[in-house]
């Protein structure tokens, strides 16, 4: 039995599609089951509730062999820090796993081993440590910057011909298309052969700077698109002014400072000489996803 969290989320929805097509028995946990596609409601067991809730996660794990685990991003105004958000949310899971031997496939960040503060990323590493400490089999999908983050900038790309972030304009920023993360997750969930703990980095085959991303976007859209680097301090002040809680107002700038300091270089991309997972190039993602979003 495969159990899926976040079946309505960006990655979870795509993991769900792949598991649905495999024919394996599965169960989903959803806060609002009415948001699930009809086919899922008829073919899967649905456990209503939040996977951060002790009773819900215990119920969902009965008879489970594999679990897809993803901590939802902290709410904008959440009054707690990033590490507390991840640990509070994962606490009930860590207690429910006991000695059941359930293989957990978890979404986390690339950059493990970095020495320094990294905001939202160190929170994800704290989650990994909590799960690993239970002794359960664990595959940590170590992901860099999602290409899909740029979909938040579709209006700016369309109207102003630019996108902006606080990431250094000329420093390579490893990325991943969430479809590659979902493919890797589904592959591990459907593979009953592993019972150890390991990190599984999933990254795009290219490693572009934001300026180089702007050049690719310009090429794909057929018009000039530029990248503007905003100062980190400006971003921090702006988030505080808009009422962001500490998880984002502190966690996001710290994360970007760590990205600008090369946090993703801290973790080997292909442990034990294996092939690096992830096949979608940034250009391919722009053709398949960004361009239709800008056009639509
Ligand atoms: N963005 C990046 O560049 C990046 C990079 C590396 C790792 N990550 C990690 O990736 C994860 C985000 O994945 P995503 O993009 O797939 O997320 P997403 O699209 O924002 O989906 C969030 C999911 O969580 C559910 N959810 C929200 N609040 C919940 C709650 N309180 N209890 C239970 N479920 C809740 C939502 O379902 P409903 O609202 O329908 O209930 C939805 O299914 C985060 O853990 C983040 O740290 C992100």
Image: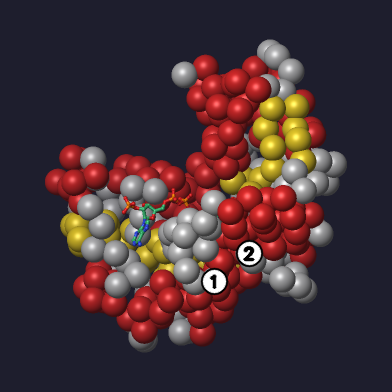
- The CA distance from mark 1 to mark 2 is 8 Å
Residue nearest the viewer, comparing 240 with 199: 240
Instruction: Say left or right for 184 vs 55.
Output: right
Residue 220, x across and y down, in percent: 66, 19
Q: Quadrant of residue 56?
A: bottom left
Which residue in the structure is indicated by mark 1? 81
Instruction: Say left or right for 174 vs 97.
Output: right
Residue furthest toward the front? 241
The image's mark for residue 280 is none
Which residue in the structure is indicated by mark 2? 250
Q: Residue at x 68, y 13 (%)?
A: 222
Residue nearest the viewer, comparing 122 with 245: 245
Residue 193, x across and y down, in percent: 45, 66
Residue furthest toward the right? 170
Residue 80 lies, with reference to residue 190, above or below; the image says below
Determine whether the residue tagged by mark 1 lies in a helix, strand or loop: loop
């Amino acid at each position: 039995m495969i159990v899926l969290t976040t079946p309505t989320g960006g990655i979870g929805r795509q993991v769900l599609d792949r598991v649905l097509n495999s024919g394996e028995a599965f169960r989903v946990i959803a806060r609002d089951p009415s948001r699930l596609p009809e086919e899922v409601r008829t073919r899967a067991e649905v456990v209503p509730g939040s996977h951060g809730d002790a009773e819900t996660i215990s119920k969902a794990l009965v008879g489970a062999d594999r679990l897809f685990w993803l901590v939802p991003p902290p709410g904008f105004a959440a009054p707690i820090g990033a590490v507390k958000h991840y640990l509070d949310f994962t606490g009930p899971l860590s207690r429910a796993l006991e000695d059941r031997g359930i293989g957990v496939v978890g979404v986390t960040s690339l950059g493990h081993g970095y020495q320094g503060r990294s905001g939202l990323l160190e929170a994800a590493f704290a989650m990994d440590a909590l799960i690993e400490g239970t002794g359960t089999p664990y595959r940590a999908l170590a992901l860099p910057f999602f290409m899909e983050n740029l979909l938040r900038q579709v209006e700016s790309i369309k109207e102003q011909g630019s996108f902006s972030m606080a990431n250094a304009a000329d420093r390579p920023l490893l990325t991943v298309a969430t479809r590659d993360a979902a493919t890797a997750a589904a592959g591990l969930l459907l593979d009953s052969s592993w019972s150890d703990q390991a990190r599984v980095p999933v990254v795009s085959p290219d490693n572009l700077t934001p300026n180089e991303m702007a050049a690719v976007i310009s090429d794909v859209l057929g018009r000039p698109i530029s990248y503007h680097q905003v100062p980190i301090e400006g971003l921090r002040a702006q988030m505080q002014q808009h009422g962001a809680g500490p998880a984002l107002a502190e966690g996001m700038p710290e994360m970007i400072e760590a990205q600008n300091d090369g946090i993703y270089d801290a973790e080997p991309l292909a442990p034990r000489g294996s092939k690096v997972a992830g096949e979608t190039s940034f250009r391919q993602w722009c053709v398949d996803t960004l361009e239709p979003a800008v056009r639509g």
